[in-house]
Image (cartoon, grey):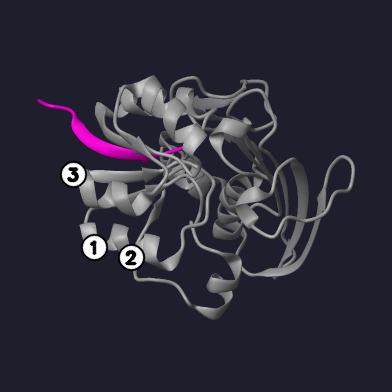
Amino acid sequence: MANARIIVWARRGQESLVDDALRAGNLAIAGVGAPTVADATALGSHWDRPATSDIRQTARETDAAAWWIAAPCVLGGDERGALAERGCPVFTSEPRPIAFDELLTGDASSLDTAFVPLFRRSAGYRGTLDAVEAFGPAPSMSVVVAGGPGDGSLFARLYDAMDTLVTLGGTVERLDAALGGETTATPDRLVDLTGSMTVSLRFTGGRSGTAHVSNQTGGWFRRLTLAGEAGILSIGDNGYAWHRGDAGGPETGGEGAPG
């Protein structure tokens, strides 16, 4: 079967991420683009494909089964419109490739996108649904979502972590967040947010949660931990370990289950 052909919009430093996804998904690059001319030239050379820094031109001139917006970027209304006109699926490595003020005002095009790297969609998490149900509501939970700069922005890691905690915890009653390291000016665009962050949450009903997120680590890592009367349930991308506190050792499931 021929590989499905996709268009990749990325930046330098994301070559390994894209190459790994191409192999895992049996995909081929039909065209490549980047937010800057320099990045487009470098990526076009890396994959030996036509490359531009104009997403509208790429949309007009290149046919593909899908788009992957891997780069942390903000697309203008005309750029989103050009993608929408193609009528093919658009997958993103960032939650939404639009400006924050457009999110607040609802001034966004009808472009539908799918945020790919959600922990809830990973094989490890999906394979633990029975264990999570058997564990029951956890009064305390924590999640670590981390990756390198090439994996996306801190905003993307934060979005994934909050999606996980809110799915399990419900309505947030109180939230406190702090960026680690030296204090710097907050960027105007969420996709430019970088570094490491800790978030503490209090949910209605008395449950609590903590998120540790970063886009500055050496590699990809995600781990959800639930703590309660049933013990400790630790869930990673590839499996889980349930420590019940007895002498029998943890119950594990999935490939490469966390210890």
Residue 223 in percent (x, y) is at: 61, 35
Q: Residues within 10 Å of mark 2 (few under 14, many from 20)?
A: some
Mark 2: secondary structure: helix
Please name the amino acid that badge 2 sits on.
Answer: Gly
Q: Position of residue 61 (x, y in %)?
A: 22, 46
Residue at image mark 2: 81
**Of the numbered discs in the image, which one, if any, rests on residue 63?**
3
Quadrant housing residue 46: top left
Q: Position of residue 216 (x, y in %)?
A: 70, 32
* Residue at far bottom of view: 105
The quadrant of the picture occupied by the N terminus is: top left
* Residue 147 shows in this picture: no
Q: Earlier in the sequence, mark 2 or mark 3?
A: 3
Q: Which residues are magenta?
A: 1-10
Q: Residue at x 47, y 22 (%)?
A: 16
Which secondary structure, mark 3? loop
In the current view of this chain or complex, which residue is farthest to the left? 1
Asked if labels 1 and 2 touch by Cβ distance under 8 angstroms, the answer is yes
- The amino acid type of the residue labelled 3 equals Asp
